[in-house]
Amino acid sequence: METGYDYVAGLPVTLMNGIWFIMSCLLGLAYLVNHVIKPDERNWLGILAKYLMQYGKAKPVPQPTDVPKRFFVHFYILAVIYNLVCLVTLFGLCQNWWSHNWIANVFFLHDTNQQTGDQLSVIMVMVLLTIHTSKRLYECLFVSVFSKNAKMTPIHYLWGFVYYLLIPPTLIAECLPLHKLPNGSFQVRHYIAIVGFCIASYIHHNSHVILANLRKKGGCKQDSHGIPQKGMFEYVSCPHYFAEVLIYLFTAIIIFPQCHSWLALLAYNTVVHANMAMISHAWYKETFSSYPPKRKAFFPHLL
Ligand SMILES: NC(=O)c1ccc[n+]([C@@H]2O[C@H](COP(=O)([O-])OP(=O)(O)OC[C@H]3O[C@@H](n4cnc5c(N)ncnc54)[C@H](OP(=O)(O)O)[C@@H]3O)[C@@H](O)[C@H]2O)c1
């Protein structure tokens, strides 16, 4: 296929795909070190892998440079504003209202000579992303009860911003110029994806409500942690992480035929959430002797 990009394993060589690839490899490695190799606590590899992955309740030793975990809200303030600006930009480009594509300029994207896909799918995924980040902002502001002690490293904090900036350019990298794409029409995959997105968003939100209610309704004190019950917590320790991956999976169903790069983002999301879930699950089992033994970490009945 003749395009403005070089291709490796079916994926265009873009800044974003390079970053998703490097991050997935780093986190995959951290997963191996933390959960398979399990080196001595004093081994530098173990210390590095733990530093990269541990935050929140599973972060054992606070550092002076750590940032409060409630600063998560900053990511979502940025992401909601940014996604709305991207949505308007992309819609205007599809309609040929303007031709200047600042997203392409900033992230070194090219026009493709042979396009796939349609405008409807691009705009639909951008709308779903905006809904998802708005929901997260609402949860951070009005649902979640953050503890004073929960921290993240400055690397986590900085990466949180970069992560959300990279998503819209990943979405459009393979379908520029947008005004030349066909309009598109609703297909079965769009309906499946919307229903799936709504169910996954419900599981995600409900899990955050259950966690917050532990502190609001006396299941544990404001700054401590309890054992979450009910909902998908009956099956896994981190249903919100599982649901977040499902959210990206359902957006992939919409966009995959035209944007293979979305799979790189999905792979990154799966690796990072599986990692965090395993760490959280191990922390629950170490902390609570009465922790439900049949509960898995991330994927019901499997992992
Ligand atoms: N896409 C990505 O790369 C990415 C990365 C990270 C997170 N996320 C998303 O962001 C969302 C939040 O992630 P997170 O890592 O902050 O989740 P989390 O550690 O489970 O925390 C969520 C909220 O629940 C509280 N909490 C956690 N466990 C609790 C327990 N046992 N008892 C009482 N309260 C508890 C936390 O309080 P504390 O203040 O004590 O922590 C926090 O307020 C997730 O849904 C995730 O999908 C996305």
Image (tube, helix red, strand yellow):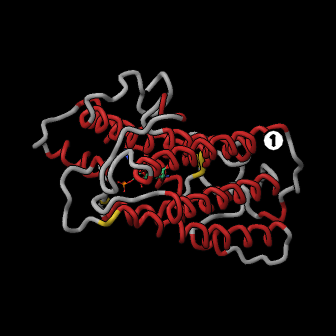
Residue located at (66% from left, 64% from top): 110
Q: Which residue is mark 1?
A: 191
**Residue 258: where, in percent of width, then height?**
73, 47
- Classify residue 204 as left or right of residue 66: right
User: To which quarter of the image does residue 65 belong?
Assistant: bottom left
Q: Is mark 1 within 8 Å of ligand 1?
A: no
Q: Can the viewer see residue 257?
A: no
Q: Secondary structure at mark 1?
A: helix
**Residue 107: where, in percent of width, then height?**
57, 67
Residue located at (46% from left, 32% from top): 236
How many numbered marks does the figure carry?
1
**Crowd band around label 1 with a 10 angstrom C-alpha radius: few (<14), some (14–19), many (20+):** few
**Residue 41: where, in percent of width, then height?**
13, 40
Outermost residue on the left side: it is: 42
Q: Nearer the viewer, residue 151 or 264?
A: 151
- Classify residue 11 as left or right of residue 35: right
- Classify residue 91 as left or right of residue 271: right
Q: Nearer the viewer, residue 115 or 184?
A: 184
Residue located at (50% from left, 27% from top): 300
Residue located at (50% from left, 62% from top): 140
Judge whether 287 appears above or below 259 on screen. above
- Classify residue 127 as left or right of residue 155: right
Q: Quadrant of the C terminus?
A: top left
What kind of residue is marked 1? Tyr
Judge whether 263 appears above or below 212 on screen. above
**Residue 254: where, in percent of width, then height?**
74, 45
Q: Can the viewer see residue 274?
A: yes
